[in-house]
Amino acid sequence: MATVILKWNPAISSYTLGRSDHGFEQAREEKNYMLNWSIWEHEQVHAGDRFFMLRVGDGNTGIVMSGQVVSEPYRDEDWSGKGRITYYADILPDFMIDSEQGPVLETATLQGEMPDFQWDGGHSGMILPEGHIEKLEWLWCDFLFRCYYQAYSEALVCNVPHLPSPEVFHFYRNYAPIPLQLSLIQERGGTCEVCGYSYGEIFKDGLGMHHLYHIFEGDGNIENDGPRKHFHCVCKNCMNYHENMPPAEIGDDREIPAYFEDLLAARAT
């Protein structure tokens, strides 16, 4: 799965600031807002790839959107009217930031962390080198928790259906991107922290271990600590122990306890 960096310059793009405002409204109301975007390296992009949109040019520049590519690239008329050969792909955002109203993951931060990639300017639809994917995912995750987890504002719109507030927390609890989970597996060995079963021994390359890592509230200050330390490796069997816990000790959706310590306590009974 590739990670595609889309570029957006509101000063010259057909996707104006006014159109983006309309997109925010649609995402808030429908939670299924889709759009298409020009893809430069179209031969390397496929449905299911991850994308990040980078605002360039003047103003508050940096990452303003993340999500998934949901179509194969296709040729269509040049959005600029210059008659160039142009390919597009349909994209489905998960998070969208109004860069006129709130903070973004700034270009300067991206350049400092990954200086060998062209973050300022360049074509839209460039493939991020594989060695940078994990780093960008953690930067984005840290940024969203630092800026939008508790202080949730109208500047951030979540386009994922059925997520309770705060959407940032529940997105990473249920849909943590695979690069984050793979990095956690490599870091912690893929051993369930409740029962001690080693999935790392069974799935030595990490495949088949996805969705073992869940983020929990209640064990510290996520914004200040960073979310990484709040992810725990818990297998599905141990997640089921919370079914016998009193309702007052269970998270609001009864799928995953709010506290990691609840799982440990339930497992001990």
Image (tube, grey):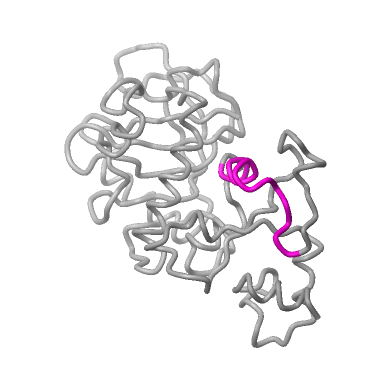
- Magenta span: 180-194
Horizontal side of residue 91 vs 188, given as left or right = left
Query: Is residue 183 located in the magenta-colored stretch of the structure?
Result: yes
Please identify the dominant SS of the magenta region: helix
Q: Quadrant of residue 266?
A: bottom right
Horizontal side of residue 192 vs 163, given as left or right = right
Horizontal side of residue 169 vs 98, given as left or right = right
Q: Position of residue 63 (x, y in %)?
A: 35, 41
Residue at 40 percent across and 55 percent down: it is 144
Q: Position of residue 195 (x, y in %)?
A: 78, 63
Q: Position of residue 25 (x, y in %)?
A: 38, 57
Residue at 43 percent across and 18 percent down: it is 40
Q: Quadrant of residue 269?
A: bottom right
- Asked whether 151 or 130 is in front, the reply is 130
| Most distant residue in the left direction | 58
Locate the N terminus by quadrant: top right
Query: Is residue 209 located in the magenta-colored stretch of the structure?
Result: no
**What number of labels is visible?**
0
Residue at 37 percent across and 57 percent down: it is 156
Residue at 41 percent across and 61 percent down: it is 225
Relative height, residue 168 to residue 243 (above, below): above
Relative height, residue 229 to residue 200 (above, below): below
- Asked whether 128 or 41 is in front, the reply is 128
Q: Position of residue 239 (x, y in %)?
A: 75, 66
Horizontal side of residue 235 vs 154, given as left or right = right
